[in-house]
Image (spheres, rainbow, N blue to C red):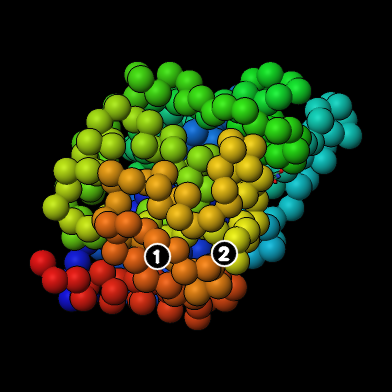
Amino acid sequence: MALARNIAVLIGGVGGAKLASGLAAVVPTERLSFIVNTGDDFWRLGLKICPDLDTLMYTLAGLVNPESGWGVKADSTVALDFLAQRYQVEPWFRLGDKDLATHLLRTHWLNDGRSLTEATACLVKRLAIRSAILPMCDEEAPTMLDTVADGELGFQEYFVKRSWAPAVRAIRHKNCERAKLSAQVRRALTRADIVLIAPSNPWLSIAPILAIPGMRDLLSQLAAPVVAVTPIIAGDAVKGPTAKIMRELGLQVRASAIARYYRGIISGFVDDLRNEPADFADLRSIQLDTLMIDQARKAALAQATLDWVGSWSP
Ligand code: FO1
């Protein structure tokens, strides 16, 4: 594949950011556009929190906390501790001091009338990131989990407060019918020579993006290849609730179930070497080492994926 090609990536949180980091190591970063899940976003203490945007932003800026994969490295929690100790505010959502600066500035700009796309672009520019980081939409379309025992929970209540323990029976993208494809997202997708779906949780991180009216149609009509990377390795999720949710939704925990979920959108699928070879029907597929345990492997997966797609005959 020629170096100067445009790549758009649909992406969620920590798992997806690893591939983003690999891509940034092997292609000019200004050629990368990320369309990021905002279904996890919520308001906390009057501040707009956008975990997946920030995870990607901090990763590409070299600021991410390497232990957790989210938040800022070497951050302190002076404000959070003071809130807990002196004001009895429950510190269930860990907001570090440096991370708080991002939420303050973003919320300030939103209150000033900027869209989330504009506010994110300003943060990205000030962090000297050359890739485009685009919220999936400017409207709020929060992911809601319908749980067996506790009814409907907001995403962060389910994921962080309840440690994704409650069994899920359905997932809803509240108000998604009101969301619109932004001009920036549309342009990133139509200009892309290749579209990747990162190995993020298909149901929690990618489904909210696909739920935006017009998104599925746009993706299915693109001339460019659309290729998903498996989040299932050796028949399980590397981290997080992907496998648990698949079981709860009555699906088999297999890469082929992920490929089936993306049917009609993707033309290719990157499976993992450790998975049982599967029949992906009419999709092109390849088995690669998708376990991104260090920077070298992140870059190797990004390069191998781009080389593979670049070798497809037109
Ligand atoms: N994840 C946690 O498991 N616990 C936290 O306290 C937590 C705080 C947090 C603060 C800012 C931020 O940007 C992300 C944060 N995350 C936390 C991660 C995040 O909520 C999830 O990993 C994603 O929403 C899932 O993609």
Left or right position of 100 against 200: right
Does dot 2 land on a helix, a strand or a loop?
Answer: strand
Tell me residue 300's x, y (percent).
43, 79
The answer to which of marks 2 and 1 sits earlier in the sequence is: 2
Instruction: Measure how far apart labels 2 and 1 are at the Cα level.
Output: 11 Å
Left or right position of 228 against 91: left
Question: At 61% from the left edge and 57% from the top edge, which residue is drawn?
Answer: 237
Question: At 68% from the left edge and 26% from the top edge, which residue is drawn?
Answer: 147
Tell me residue 242's x, y (percent).
59, 48
As drawn, which residue projects farthest toward the right?
85
Does dot 1 land on a helix, a strand or a loop?
Answer: strand
Residue 154 visible in the picture: no
Would you say the beta carbon of the disc 2 residue lies within 8 angstroms of ligand 1? no
User: Which kind of residue does numbered mark 2 sit on?
Assistant: Ile
Question: At 60% from the left edge and 61% from the top edge, which residue is drawn?
Answer: 235
- Of residues 140 and 118, the one nearer the viewer is 140
Which label number is shown at residue 233? 2
Assign ligand 1 to one image quadrant.
top right
Mark 1 highlights which residue?
Answer: 270
Tell me residue 199's x, y (percent).
47, 57
In the image, residue 31 sits, relative to residue 35, either above or below, namely: below
Other-residue count near label 2 (Cα within 10 Å), few / some / many at <14 / 14–19 / ≥20: many
In the image, residue 93 sits, relative to residue 54, either above or below, namely: above
